[in-house]
Image (tube, rainbow, N blue to C red):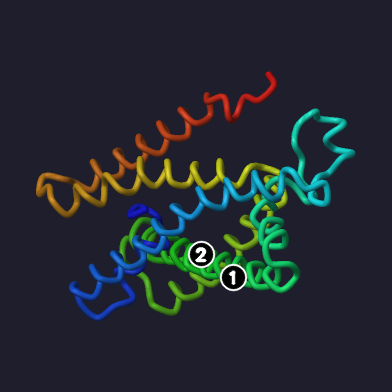
Amino acid sequence: TAGLPHILMRFFTVKDAKEARKSVVVATGFIGYFYLLTFIIGFGAILFVSNNPAYLDSAKMLMTGKLELVGGNNMAAVHLAHAIGGDWFLGFISAVAFATILAVVAGLTLSGASSVSHDLYANVFKKGQTTEASQLKVSKMATVGLAIFAMFLGIVFEKQNVAFMVGLAFAVAASANFPVLVLSMYWKGLTTRGAVVGGWLGLLSAVTLIFFTKAVWVDT
């Protein structure tokens, strides 16, 4: 969790180091609390959703021979909300999910645009010889580009298991971002080249190991 971009950017939204530490602890705590709730949501979905014909896609189940929910298996939490609280609770959970997605997407977009405009454009390509106006222009272009790319990936991976995709993000963050972050704070011998090489090795190793798991090679 500490290696995720929208968590790391909380360091730059506060006035001093004390508030930065507090902000990260609070954010990480809420995320940890949410993932504890996934156990309850999962068992609840098994009990209330998988046994209710109203939420099952019978036609698709005949084709695949597996449990299939209306709208896809990623809709389990939404169906669970309707099964427990009816239309009112369904609307409430849908609004919460939308707000959560919006907050995460906004944070990731800002983080990505900042990385492109400040880290890549200003420091790598321009070697620091740039202006705030040009960085702002690049940041806006990067925001639009990242949004279009994210929508494309969303369409391509529409029916994929959300839990697996989230696990992929955590694996990459834990392998590429977090080690470099910790070493930069506690090891004085860390160099820029070492940080870049270590980050790339962590990224490639995480993606490679996930690529060869059974979760990817299904029915092959």
Residue wearing tag 1 = 96
Q: Nearer the viewer, mark 1 or mark 2?
A: 1
Residues 31 and 83: in front is 83
The quadrant holding residue 111 is bottom left
Residue drawn 39% across the image and 47% down it: 173
Q: Position of residue 107 (x, y in %)?
A: 47, 67
Does residue 27 appear to the left or right of 48 in the view shown?
left
Does residue 123 appear to the left or right of 215 in the view shown?
left
- Placement of 129 over or under 155, stated as above or below: below
Residue 69 disc label: none
Does residue 147 appear to the left or right of 158 in the view shown?
left
Residue drawn 45% across the image and 53% down it: 35
Residue drawn 23% across the image and 75% down it: 19
Q: Position of residue 76 (x, y in %)?
A: 67, 51
Residue drawn 48% across the image and 62% down it: 108
Crowdedness near tag 1: few (<14), some (14–19) or many (≥20) residues, C-alpha within 10 Å: few
Residue wearing tag 2 = 104
Residues 210 and 133: in front is 210
Identity, as a three-letter code, of the amino acid under mark 2: Val
What is the C-alpha distance between the residues marked 1 and 2? 12 Å
**Which element carries disc 2, helix, strand or loop?**
helix
| Observer able to see residue 36 | yes
- Placement of 73 over or under 121, stated as above or below: above
Total label count?
2
Q: Position of residue 101 (x, y in %)?
A: 57, 65
Q: Residue furthest left?
A: 188
Q: Position of residue 174 (x, y in %)?
A: 35, 44
Identity, as a three-letter code, of the amino acid under mark 1: Val
Crowdedness near tag 2: few (<14), some (14–19) or many (≥20) residues, C-alpha within 10 Å: some
Return the disc, 1 or 2, that comes first in the chain's sequence: 1
- Can you say which quadrant of the picture contains the C terminus? top right
